[in-house]
């Protein structure tokens, strides 16, 4: 029986005919209205703000995302940070809040979010800076922020550490502008579908796997894992019901043009261009990458047929991907705009969870040692050498109790759940989260942190890049813990009160 302010409906009905009935009648009406609700809070007025900042560097810069040094020779498309600020209010009282920023970066490297929060703490006294979320689209043609990541020329470039200072300033600015600009608004949610992601791990006769492995060989036996073609969409309108922002959750990293030596936002640039052409230049568009550690836009088979159809449409690869995403967005938008919610409950919970690390075995240590010795002979192998050296360092410091701390954000916005993680999370884990979640729709946002692959158990058995010890700080045991903690966090936001 539904309870309201200490009374249940049956208590009120028993009072009928007594002197108490008149005073309880309004409570009965309210209880009946709320009886069918599963919301743990009474809905409050939603306030929305949005902003964006160009985060393109001012000159040639090392690009992040490959094992070799690339210096940008051009800007093929600008990279952006796009933000939405959300607050639910009961009158003038703030009930809960969030600022979410999506960046055209390969990851949100260590310390960046702490520095942004530090800048915002005094600048936004009414905002709880722990409820700032920054995520990356994982474009491999994004500026690097770490001087030590690559073997760099002594001059003629923007140093990554210099760019990092500028980036932090711009992220603080875009967060502050979005928060300061919040006004009463509406939110809606929808679902579309687009074939953008392809599982990039090929399986072979004897059980081994390989990222981007050949599929036209006699030993090829199949593709390792599932693909999530759902496109989850959030839309935000102002009080005049004009679309001002949207978030698009696609389980595919932005790495169609990942090997180029130019700054490029990848397919998100074409998506934004198309949507702004239709809905105005001020539309804010957040690219949220779902669980996609084993996914990419690169084709694994049927390549010639796909290429032929793309050329017949007169589109380049980025335009083709954008066409699919925009069509899926339109499907979702057509539904979302029919149900605009100005009082959708907003709940935002932040917690630190400890995930068991993937332990380095003696065999893995020995193999990494051989790699370090071989790669150290050529400075051009610096990045790959350090990749293996990190395994040796982990082996020396690990204990059976060693854990990986991760900041977990779980939000409820109306019927929608949003959950973040810091990894390149294999899609199996995202499917678990969405399947077990009590929400109508569940948005999983990866790379809200520094990244590293988090593989499934079957991927570890298959081996290869993305599922070997060099690629992973956390393994399948930690992945399952992450799923369980995430689902538990979502379930608490849907508990009946």
Image (cartoon, rainbow, N blue to C red):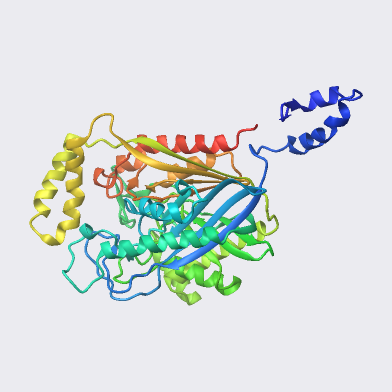
Q: Is residue 158 visible?
A: yes
Looking at the picture, does residue 261 appear above or below residue 145? below
Q: Is residue 139 visible?
A: no
Q: In which quadrant will I find the C terminus?
A: top right
- Residue 349: x, y in percent? 51, 41
- Residue 389: x, y in percent? 17, 47
Q: In which quadrant will I find the N terminus?
A: top right
Looking at the picture, does residue 440 appear above or below residue 181? above
- Residue 453: x, y in percent? 33, 47
Looking at the picture, does residue 466 appear above or below residue 55? above
| Residue at horizontal 60 percent and vertical 70 percent from the top | 279
Nearer to us in this view, 363 or 291: 291
| Residue at horizontal 30 percent and vertical 49 percent from the top | 466
Nearer to us in this view, 175 or 386: 175
Q: Could you say which quadrant of the image residue 481 lies in? A: top left
| Residue at horizontal 18 percent and vertical 72 percent from the top | 155
């Amino acid at each position: 029986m539904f309870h309201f302010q200490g009374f249940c409906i049956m208590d009120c009905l028993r009072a009928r005919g007594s002197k108490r009935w008149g005073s309880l009648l309004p409570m009965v009406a309210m209880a009946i209205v709320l009886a069918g609700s599963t919301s743990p809070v009474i809905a409050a007025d939603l306030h929305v703000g949005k902003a964006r900042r160009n985060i393109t560097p001012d000159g040639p810069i090392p690009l992040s995302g490959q094992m070799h040094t690339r210096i940008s020779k051009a800007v093929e498309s600008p990279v952006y940070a796009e933000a939405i600020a959300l607050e639910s209010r009961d009158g003038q009282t703030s009930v809960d809040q969030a600022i979410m920023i999506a960046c055209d970066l390969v990851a949100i490297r260590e310390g960046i979010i702490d520095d942004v929060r530090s800048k915002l703490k005094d600048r936004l006294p009414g905002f709880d800076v722990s409820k700032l979320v920054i995520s990356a689209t994982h474009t491999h043609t994004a500026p690097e922020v770490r001087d030590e990541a690559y073997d760099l020329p002594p001059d003629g470039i923007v140093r990554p550490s210099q760019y990092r200072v500028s980036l932090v300033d711009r992220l603080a600015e875009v967060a502050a502008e979005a928060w300061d600009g919040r006004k009463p608004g509406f939110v809606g949610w929808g679902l579309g579908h687009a074939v953008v992601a392809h599982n990039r791990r090929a399986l072979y006769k004897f059980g081994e796997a390989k990222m981007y492995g050949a599929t036209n060989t006699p030993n090829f036996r199949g593709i390792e894992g599932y693909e999530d073609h759902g496109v989850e969409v959030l839309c935000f309108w102002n009080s005049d019901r004009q679309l001002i922002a949207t978030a698009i959750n696609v389980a595919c990293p932005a790495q169609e043009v990942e090997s180029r030596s130019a700054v490029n936002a990848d397919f998100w640039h074409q998506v934004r261009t198309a949507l702004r052409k239709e809905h105005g230049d001020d539309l804010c568009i957040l690219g949220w990458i779902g669980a996609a550690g084993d996914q990419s836009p690169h084709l694994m088979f049927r390549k010639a047929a796909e290429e032929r159809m793309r050329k017949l449409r007169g589109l380049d690869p980025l335009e083709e991907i954008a066409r699919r995403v925009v069509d899926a967005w339109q499907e979702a938008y057509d539904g979302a705009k029919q149900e605009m919610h100005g009082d959708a409950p907003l709940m935002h919970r932040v917690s630190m969870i400890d995930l068991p690390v993937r332990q380095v075995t003696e065999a893995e240590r020995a193999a990494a040692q051989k790699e370090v010795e071989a790669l150290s002979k050529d400075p051009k192998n610096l990045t790959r050498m350090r990749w293996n050296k990190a395994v040796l360092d982990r082996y020396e410091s690990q204990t059976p109790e060693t854990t990986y701390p991760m900041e977990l954000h779980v939000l409820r916005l109306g019927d929608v759940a949003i959950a973040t993680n810091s990894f390149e999370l294999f899609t199996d884990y995202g499917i678990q989260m969405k399947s077990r979640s009590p929400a109508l729709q569940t948005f999983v946002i990866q790379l809200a942190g520094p990244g590293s692959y988090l593989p499934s158990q079957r991927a570890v058995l298959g081996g290869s890049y993305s599922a070997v010890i060099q690629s992973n700080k956390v393994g399948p045991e930690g992945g399952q813990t992450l799923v369980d903690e995430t689902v538990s966090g979502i379930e608490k936001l849907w508990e009946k009160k």
